[in-house]
Image (tube, coloured by chain):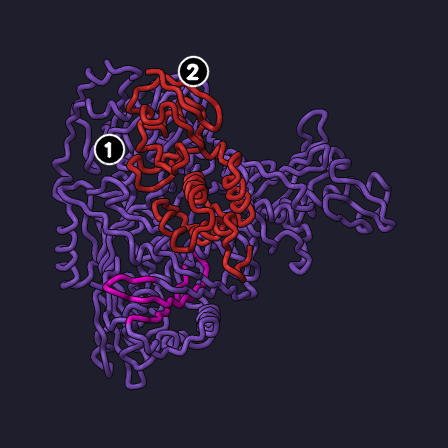
C-alpha cells in the first residue's frame, strides 16, 4: 500500500503494509536509522519522533496513521529552533554515554519544549519519565533540557 | 602497576603507508617474554598532509568513553594539540592492536603505559627525522603541538617530517621517555565524546544501523527454555508470506554440537521476518530443563544453607572456636535475584559469508576476540578467515562479553552465501536469552570480642554450578574483605544446578557481594556500638596490602583514604537524622582496582524510597584521565546501583522458562528516581591510574540498605529492597 507522508520537510511515499510501524518504515524504507528500536512496545522511548507536533512512540504508530502527516526525526530536529537548542546543549554538556537512547530523549524533549517552552523541573521530569537511559545519563539529560529552555537553575554550571 | 605491561619489552618499527600523502604508521611489536618471537601489532597513528593526526581507537565503545580515552594517551605523548586529532575505530585484530575488549574496567590499567609509549615512540621518530634534516643533535630539539622546534625557534610540522620519520629506526618503546605528569596537556583535561555530534544527528553508528548493499534481515525464534533443542519445524506457511526468503536452523552455542536451539526467519525486512514468527510451527525438546524454577532455587538454597558448605573458599584459624569465644555474635541471611542486562540496543550482528569461504562481521560486541573464537569453532573455519568490524555499541554492561548473537548471525550468513544478513533480537528475545547475573544466598555469622572488634567471621554462599565448579559469575572472591584481617574465618560455597546461562553484569560478583558484606558489616557495627566507617577503620588497621591469590591486592590505606574522604565530604557524624523517614547510610567497596566509599541520604514515605543525594569518594590512582567522562561514568554507575537496589525486579523462571516479556516485567530506572545530586571527590594516590566503568557501582547498594535501616529501623537483606 502506497502511503505518503512528510518527513523532515520532505514529501516521501512508501509502499508498506499499513500496520508496519512508522519506526520500521523510517529505518527500513526511508533510510533514516537515527530513530532507534528499543522495546517495540512503547515502554522505553528510544523510537520517539514528532508527529504533527506531538512526541509519539514510532514503534506504536502504524504507518497508516502517519499518512498525510508531518514527521520530524532526529535527522531533522535541528531544523526546529527547539531542536537546534537541544542538540547544541547535548553537545555542550556531552550528554551521551552509549548514546543509543539519545535520539529518543532529544525528540521527546523537543516535544516537551514545543508545548512548554519553559518547563518547571516537575514538568520536565514528568514529561521525560517515559524515556529510559540505560547508562543513566539522567543528570545531564535534565540539565541539557533546562539549558536549551533557558531554565537552568541559577548557580548550575552550563 | 600492571605486571603484564611492565614485563613486556616493546619496540617500535615504522613503515611508510600510503602514496602521495605524507603518512606513516607506527607499528609496535610486543614480545611476551625475552627470546619469544615478537608479535607485530598495528598502526595507531597516521599523520596527514594538513598536519591532522588520525589515531586508532582499538577497544569496543559501549558508552564507557574509551574511544576518546585511549587516543588521549597516544596524543599526549605524541605531543599534538587535541584539535589536530581525528579518531578512527579500528577493526578487531588483537595480533595487530593487542587485547581489544570492554570488560573488567581494564582499558585504563592495561593501556596507560602501552598507549603512551605508542605516542612517545612516534614522537622520538619525528624528532630524529628533524635532527637529520637540520643536521643537529635530536637532544637540542623539542616538540610543541604537532611541530618539532629547534633551539632558535625554527620549526617543522609533523606532516612535513612524517615521510622521513617513517624511515627512522624504531626506538625501544620500553625505553622511550614519557612526559612528567605535571606537563600533561591532554591527559587530565575534560574531553567530549568524539561521536556526540554524530549521535545528535542520528548518524548510523551502532550495530543495528549497519546497512550493506543487498542486505537481508533475520528474526530469531529461540527455544523458550534455555538448553532445549529443536525437534521439528513446519515452515511451509511462513515461506509463502511476502518477502520471506528462508528459515534457517541455528545454534546459540548453548546446546551440544550438532543440535539446534533456534531458527532464523530471513526476509527482505526485519519487520516482515518478525511478524512471520507467529506462523512458524516448532516443537522443542525441553524435558530436561522444565523442572527449573525460581521457587525451586529458593527451596534448595534454604536446604543448602541449613547444611555445611560443599566446599571451602577461604579458611583461617578455627571459626567455630572463634565464635564460641566471642563476647557477642551476629547472624544474618542475605540474598539477591537473577538479573538481566537490558542493553537498550537489542543484541544484533550483521554477517556476510563470501564465496571464498570467508566471513565478515559487523558486530556490537564487547569481546571481538571471543566472537572470533566462538564463531570459528561453530562454523569449523579458521579464526583468520573472519574479519570483524567493531561498531559503536548501544550499551554493554557485560551482556556483550558473550557472543551468542554473533555466532548465530554467522550461521545464517553461511546458509545464504553472498548475502549480508542482519540478525536482530526483539526485546523479548533479548530479555529471555540473557546471560543473567546469577542469584545468590549468604548466611553470615560474625563474632565480636568485648571491645567490639571482629574476631571470627563465617560466610556460607549458595549459588549455581555443577561438579563443584561455579557457573560464570556465580563466584565470590576467596580473599573477600575482611576475611584476611580476621583471626578465625571460614568462607564456604554450595552450588545447585540451573539450566540458565549466567554471566557478568557490570561489576560482576561485586554488585551482589558488596550489598551482602557491607550490609552485614553495618549490622555488626551496630552490635559493636559503632558506625560502619568506624568499624571499617578499626578492622582495616595500618596501611598495607592484604594477602590475595588473585591480584590486585586490597590496600588498607587506600580503603581508609576514601572512607575518611567521603565522611568529610558529606559531614558524616554517624548520628540519626532526627527527622522521621530520613536516613543516611554508608557503603565502601574495592573492586576492579578501584576504592569507593559512598554515602546516601534518602527519604522513605508511604513505603517509597527517594534518594536525595549521594556522595562519592573514589581512589583510582594518580590521574583522572578525562574528568568530564569520569564524573559521568561515576554518576551513571551510582544510578545503575540505585536501580539494582530499588527498581529492578527479579528475573522469574517457571517451568524452566524465563517469565519476561518486556520492560513492563523488567522495569528500568527512570528520571523520576534520580537523586538531585551525585557529588564526587577523587582521592589522588601515588598508584597507576585504573578503570572507572564499574567500581563506583557496588557500594551504593549497601549504602541505600543501610540508610533505609537508619530511616525506618528496618534491616532489609534481600534485593531489591522493599520497605513494605
From the image, state the color of chain B.
Answer: purple
Residue drawn at (34%, 19%) of the image: A16
Residue B586 highlighted magenta (yes or no): yes
Residue closest to the eye, B96 or A143:
A143
Identify residue for label 2.
Answer: B355
Residue drawn at (22%, 77%) of the image: B329
Chain letter, disc 1 residue:
B
Which is more N-terminal, label 2 or label 1?
1
Query: What main secondary structure does the magenta stretch of the protein show?
Result: strand
Identify residue for label 1.
Answer: B256
Question: Residue B180: percent from the left, percent from the top?
Answer: 67, 58
Q: Are marks 1 and 2 in contact (CB under 8 Å)?
A: no
From the image, state the color of chain A.
Answer: red
Residue found farthest to the top:
B240
For the record, the magenta segment spans B581-610
Residue found farthest to the bottom:
B450
Amino acid at each position: 500500500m502506497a502511503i505518503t507522508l512528510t518527513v523532515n520537510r520532505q514529501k516521501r511515499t512508501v509502499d508498506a503494509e499499513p500496520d508496519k510501524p512508522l519506526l520500521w518504515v523510517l529505518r527500513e524504507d526511508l533510510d533514516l536509522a537515527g530513530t532507534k528500536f528499543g522495546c517495540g512496545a512503547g515502554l522505553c522511548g528510544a523510537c520517539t519522533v514528532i508527529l504533527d507536533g506531538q512526541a509519539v512512540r514510532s514503534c506504536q504508530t502504524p504507518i497508516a496513521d502517519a499518512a498525510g502527516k508531518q514527521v520530524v526525526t532526529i535527522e531533522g530536529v535541528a531544523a526546529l529552533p527547539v531542536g537546534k537548542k537541544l542538540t547544541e546543549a547535548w553537545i555542550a554538556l556531552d550528554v551521551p554515554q552509549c548514546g543509543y537512547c539519545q535520539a529518543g530523549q532529544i525528540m521527546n524533549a523537543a516535544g516537551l519544549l514545543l508545548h512548554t517552552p519553559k518547563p518547571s523541573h516537575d514538568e520536565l521530569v514528568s514529561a521525560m519519565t517515559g524515556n529510559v537511559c540505560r547508562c543513566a545519563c539522567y543528570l545531564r539529560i535534565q540539565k541539557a533540557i533546562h539549558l536549551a529552555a533557558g531554565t537552568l537553575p541559577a548557580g548550575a554550571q552550563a | 602497576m600492571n605486571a603484564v605491561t611492565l614485563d613486556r619489552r616493546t619496540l617500535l618499527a615504522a613503515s611508510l603507508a600510503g602514496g602521495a600523502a605524507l603518512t606513516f604508521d607506527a607499528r609496535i611489536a610486543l614480545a611476551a617474554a625475552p627470546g619469544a618471537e615478537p608479535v607485530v601489532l598495528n598502526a595507531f597513528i597516521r599523520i596527514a598532509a594538513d598536519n591532522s593526526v588520525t589515531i586508532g581507537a582499538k577497544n569496543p565503545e559501549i558508552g564507557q568513553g574509551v574511544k576518546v580515552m585511549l587516543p588521549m594517551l597516544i596524543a599526549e605523548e605524541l605531543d599534538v594539540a587535541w584539535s589536530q586529532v581525528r579518531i578512527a575505530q579500528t577493526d578487531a585484530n588483537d595480533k595487530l592492536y593487542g587485547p581489544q575488549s570492554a570488560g573488567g574496567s581494564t582499558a585504563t590499567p592495561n593501556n596507560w603505559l602501552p598507549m603512551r609509549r605508542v605516542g612517545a615512540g612516534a614522537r622520538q621518530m619525528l624528532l630524529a627525522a628533524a635532527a637529520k634534516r637540520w643536521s643537529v643533535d635530536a637532544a637540542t630539539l623539542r616538540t610543541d603541538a604537532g611541530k618539532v622546534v629547534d633551539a632558535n625557534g625554527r620549526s617543522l610540522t609533523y606532516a612535513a617530517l612524517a615521510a622521513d620519520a617513517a624511515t627512522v629506526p624504531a626506538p625501544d618503546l620500553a625505553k622511550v621517555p614519557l612526559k612528567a605528569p605535571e606537563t600533561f596537556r591532554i591527559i587530565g583535561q575534560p574531553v567530549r565524546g568524539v561521536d556526540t555530534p554524530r549521535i545528535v544527528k542520528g548518524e548510523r553508528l551502532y550495530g543495528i544501523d549497519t546497512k550493506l548493499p543487498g542486505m537481508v534481515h533475520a528474526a530469531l525464534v529461540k527455544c523458550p527454555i534455555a538448553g532445549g533443542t529443536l525437534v521439528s519445524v513446519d515452515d511451509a506457511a511462513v515461506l509463502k508470506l511476502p518477502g520471506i526468503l528462508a528459515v534457517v536452523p541455528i545454534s546459540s552455542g548453548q546446546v551440544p554440537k550438532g543440535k539446534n536451539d533456534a531458527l532464523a526467519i530471513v526476509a527482505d525486512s526485519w519487520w516482515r521476518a518478525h511478524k512471520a514468527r507467529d506462523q512458524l510451527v516448532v516443537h522443542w525438546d525441553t524435558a530436561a530443563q522444565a523442572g527449573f524454577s525460581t521457587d525451586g532455587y529458593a527451596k534448595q538454597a534454604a536446604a543448602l544453607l541449613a547444611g555445611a558448605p560443599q566446599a571451602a573458599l577461604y579458611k583461617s584459624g578455627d571459626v567455630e572456636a572463634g565464635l564460641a569465644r566471642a563476647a557477642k555474635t551476629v547472624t544474618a541471611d542475605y540474598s539477591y535475584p537473577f538479573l538481566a542486562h537490558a542493553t537498550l540496543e537489542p543484541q544484533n550482528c550483521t554477517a556476510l559469508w563470501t564465496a571464498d569461504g570467508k566471513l565478515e562481521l559487523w558486530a556490537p560486541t564487547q569481546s571481538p576476540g571471543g566472537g572470533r573464537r566462538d564463531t570459528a569453532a561453530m562454523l569449523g573455519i579458521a579464526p583468520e578467515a573472519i574479519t570483524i568490524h567493531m561498531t559503536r555499541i548501544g550499551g554493554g554492561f557485560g551482556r556483550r562479553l558473550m557472543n551468542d548473537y554473533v555466532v548465530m548471525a554467522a550461521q545464517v550468513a553461511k546458509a545464504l552465501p553472498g548475502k549480508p544478513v542482519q540478525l536482530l533480537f526483539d526485546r523479548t528475545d533479548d530479555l529471555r536469552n540473557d546471560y543473567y547475573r546469577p542469584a545468590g544466598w549468604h548466611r553470615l555469622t560474625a563474632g565480636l570480642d568485648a571491645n567490639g572488634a571482629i574476631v571470627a567471621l563465617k560466610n556460607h554462599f549458595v549459588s549455581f554450578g555443577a561438579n563443584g565448579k561455579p557457573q560464570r559469575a556465580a563466584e565470590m572472591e576467596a580473599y573477600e574483605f575482611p576475611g584476611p584481617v580476621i583471626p578465625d574465618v571460614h568462607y564456604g560455597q554450595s552450588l545447585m544446578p540451573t539450566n540458565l546461562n549466567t554471566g557478568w553484569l557490570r561489576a560482576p560478583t561485586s554488585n551482589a557481594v558488596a550489598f551482602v558484606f557491607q550490609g552485614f558489616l553495618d549490622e555488626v557495627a551496630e552490635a559493636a556500638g559503632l558506625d560502619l566507617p568506624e568499624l571499617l577503620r578499626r578492622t582495616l588497621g595500618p596501611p598495607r596490602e592484604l594477602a590475595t591469590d588473585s591480584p590486585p591486592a586490597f590496600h588498607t590505606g587506600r580503603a581508609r583514604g576514601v572512607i575518611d574522604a567521603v565522611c568529610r565530604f558529606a559531614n558524616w557524624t554517624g548520628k540519626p537524622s532526627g527527622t522521621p523517614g530520613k536516613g543516611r547510610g554508608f557503603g565502601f567497596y574495592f573492586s576492579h582496582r578501584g576504592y569507593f566509599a559512598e554515602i546516601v541520604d534518602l527519604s522513605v514515605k508511604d513505603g517509597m524510597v527517594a534518594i536525595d543525594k549521594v556522595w562519592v569518594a573514589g581512589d583510582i590512582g594518580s590521574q583522572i584521565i578525562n574528568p568530564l567522562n569520569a564524573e559521568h561514568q561515576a554518576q551513571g554507575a551510582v544510578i545503575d546501583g540505585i536501580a539494582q537496589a530499588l527498581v529492578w525486579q527479579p528475573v522469574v523462571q517457571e517451568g524452566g522458562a524465563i517469565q519476561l516479556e518486556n520492560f513492563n516485567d523488567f522495569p528500568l530506572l527512570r528520571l523520576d528516581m534520580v537523586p538531585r545530586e551525585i557529588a564526587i571527590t577523587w582521592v589522588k594516590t601515588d598508584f597507576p591510574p585504573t578503570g572507572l566503568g564499574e567500581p563506583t557501582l557496588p557500594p551504593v547498594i549497601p549504602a541505600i540498605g543501610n540508610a533505609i535501616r537508619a530511616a525506618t529501623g528496618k534491616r532489609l537483606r534481600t534485593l531489591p529492597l522493599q520497605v513494605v
